[in-house]
Amino acid sequence: MDQMAFSEEDRGRFDDLLASAKPFLLEQERQDDLRPPNFNIFRVLGYEYRETSTHSALLAHLLNPFGSHGQKEVFLRIFLEILEKAASDQNKPLSVSLQTSSDNWACEPEFVLRSPYRGKIDIVLRHREHLIIIENKIHAADQSNQLYRYWEYANATFKGNKLKSFLILYLTPLGVDPSAYSLSPWNKTFDNWPEPRRELINFSYRKHIKSFLERSIQSLESERRAISISELLRQYENLVRSIK
């Protein structure tokens, strides 16, 4: 087969193209030196798929205004804004005020439910007027009556404490619906969770958590603060992009 012949003019254009691309290639090399693209502390430590000790623990800490991150309610505000948009997209009402203060919120991971509800909620966000439950599912399967039990607990807390609202976020890689196995009551004498389950919002890592991390990083970097946290969130965001 004859080799394709290039004219002097073609060679000149190719050389010009390489010359124009060189600054971009050098900048990419510099960025790779600053942030090695294949290094991720979560993968190095083998924590990338640990729902409880990695994902729930980190998210709960960021949402805690009193966390050691020292950013007060910055991350919580961003999260609530994203939650507001998700609720709107799914035609769900949302009465949680975005004009929040760190004094009014608390966040607790691995919240243990006592009888008769049973179970351990991954993340509980509490406000004097609101309750937000986050059930985190990456690879774990739904448990029997799990979300129904959480709804019963939240509904009882809502009535007993005269809250304005409660929400249950079902957090999965792609924002899929929970199973009927999780939504159904464990006792046939109990009432079903009324359709359209207005307190239930599907949340996803690939869309909502990714956006939460991007905006959190942008907030830190725009004000040039908490560099160590910003770098950690960059690595975590990279991990979130790969969750399937």
Image (cartoon, rainbow, N blue to C red):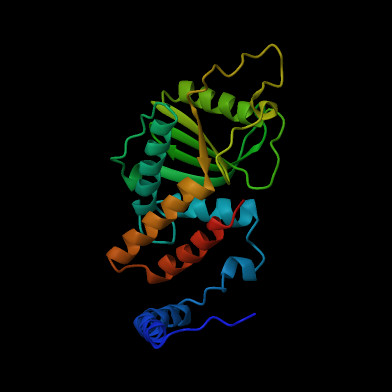
Relative to 237, 50 lies left or right:
right
| Residue 88 on image: x %, y % | 38, 31
Q: Give the residue at the far top of this rendering.
A: 189
Q: Residue at x 65, y 55 (%)?
A: 50
Q: Quadrant of the N terminus?
A: bottom right
- Name the residue located 52 percent from the left edge and 44 percent from the top edge: 204
> As displayed, is residue 147 above or below residue 210?
above
Front residue of this view, candidates 4 and 45: 4
- Of 7 and 141, the residue lying toward us: 7
The image shows residue 143, relative to residue 209, as above or below, that is above
Name which quarter of the figure residue 140 lies in: top right
Residue 113 as seen in the image, left or right of residue 26: right
* Relative image position of residue 186 (x, y in whole percent): 71, 21
- Is 189 situated left or right of 33 in this image? right
**Quarter-wise, where is residue 47 in the image?**
bottom right
Please state which of residues 241 and 24 is positioned toward the viewer in this rendering.
Answer: 24
Q: Nearer the viewer, residue 13 or 234?
A: 13
Residue shown at 61% from the left, 30% from the top: 147
Measured as percent of width and height from the top left, residue 142 is found at: 69, 36
| Residue 73: x %, y % from top left | 35, 51
Quarter assignment of residue 44: bottom right
